[in-house]
Image (spheres, helix red, strand yellow):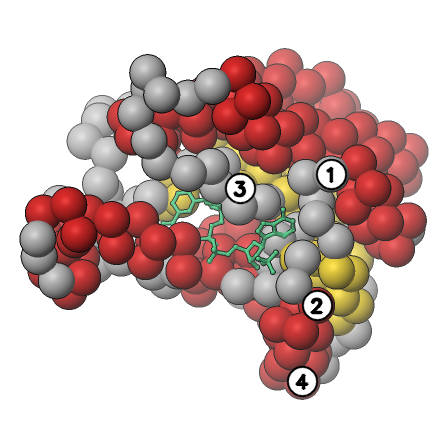
Amino acid sequence: MDLGLSGKRALVCAGSKGLGRGCAEALAAAGVEIVLNARGAEVLERTAVEIAAAHGVKVSPVAADITTLEGRAKVIAAAGEIDILVTNAGGPPPGVWSDWAHEDFLAAIEANMLAPIALMQAFVPGMSARGWGRVVNITSAAVKAPIAQLGLSNTARCGLTGFVAGMARQVAPTGVTVNNLLPGIHATDRMAALDGPVAQAEGISLEEASARRKATIPARRYGAPQDFGAVCAFLCSQQAAFIVGQNVLVDGGAANQTL
Ligand code: NAP
């Protein structure tokens, strides 16, 4: 399907690996020029070269921590005028609700709520002025079905979800759509980092821990970054112009709910 995105420019945050990379790949495949961000310059530059070579589009790496004021300022300045914004950052660590300190909550809210809001504040006014734009915020299935040990994520991402619910409807008249994309379990470094402690706690191998988790997913597998990226690119497409303020779950059916 031609997504009608050829020649557009996108900023994909936290995109050197995993789900962010999946989104960058799918947008590049649709002819979108990419500004690609992550902290680690080496992997970022390698990923940028690989995506550019695979899809024949310009990919400009910007190494910076998107959760800090300075990092964001660097990315915003480097990105310039963009049509598409994909917000993303690393997720908060797992833990027990009674152990998290004030600083832990502030860090999670900074990374997974305030950073995407600041990026939207930086880029959406320009998109609105030009009459076209797309924002996809990578959040989590935890927004719809809480994951108890990821309480910091549940908290910060629900805050972002509430913000987007109102803001998306305010900017929709200007031709800008804002939606959230909710990953269920995908095979990325983040998932390996979460499976590891489970295997350790239960005295089983990593393979066994991942097999048990796959058995809880109706699709019986972890998602691939390509599964996720394809939906992101569709949400950015011309065809998706009437999808506004939605929370789109990509989870292989794992959340057992009717709506
Ligand atoms: P991942 O495979 O660990 O990749 C994370 C990417 O983000 C890397 O490119 C990393 O590069 C970059 N990054 C991390 N922190 C950053 C920061 N502060 N500033 C800029 N770049 C940063 O993770 P993932 O699985 O793709 O997950 C992406 C997001 O989706 C996370 O918030 C995660 O919690 C959420 N999520 C994932 C799953 C899943 O199953 N994978 C499920 C639900 C929610 P550098 O380290 O070099 O910066």
The C terminus lies in quadrant: top left
Report the front residue among 153 and 193.
Answer: 193
Residue 157 vs residue 94: left or right? right
The N terminus lies in quadrant: bottom right
- The image position of residue 231, as x and y in percent, is 48, 52
Q: Earlier in the sequence, mark 4 or mark 1?
A: 4
- Secondary structure beneath disc 3? strand
The residue where tag 1 is placed is 68
- Secondary structure beneath disc 2? helix
Cα distance, mark 4 to mark 1?
31 Å
The residue where tag 2 is placed is 41
Mark 1 close to ligand 1, CB under 8 Å: yes
Q: Earlier in the sequence, mark 3 or mark 4?
A: 4
Q: Work out whether residue 218 can be spotted.
A: no
Disc 4 residue crowd, few under 14, some 14–19, many 20+, Cα 10 Å: few
Cα distance, mark 3 to mark 4?
25 Å
Q: Is residue 164 above or below residue 14?
A: above
The residue where tag 3 is placed is 138
Report the front residue among 211 and 197.
Answer: 197
> Which amino acid is tagged 2?
Ala
Mark 2 close to ligand 1, CB under 8 Å: no
Image point (69%, 80%), residue name: 49
Q: Nearer the viewer, mark 2 or mark 4?
A: 2
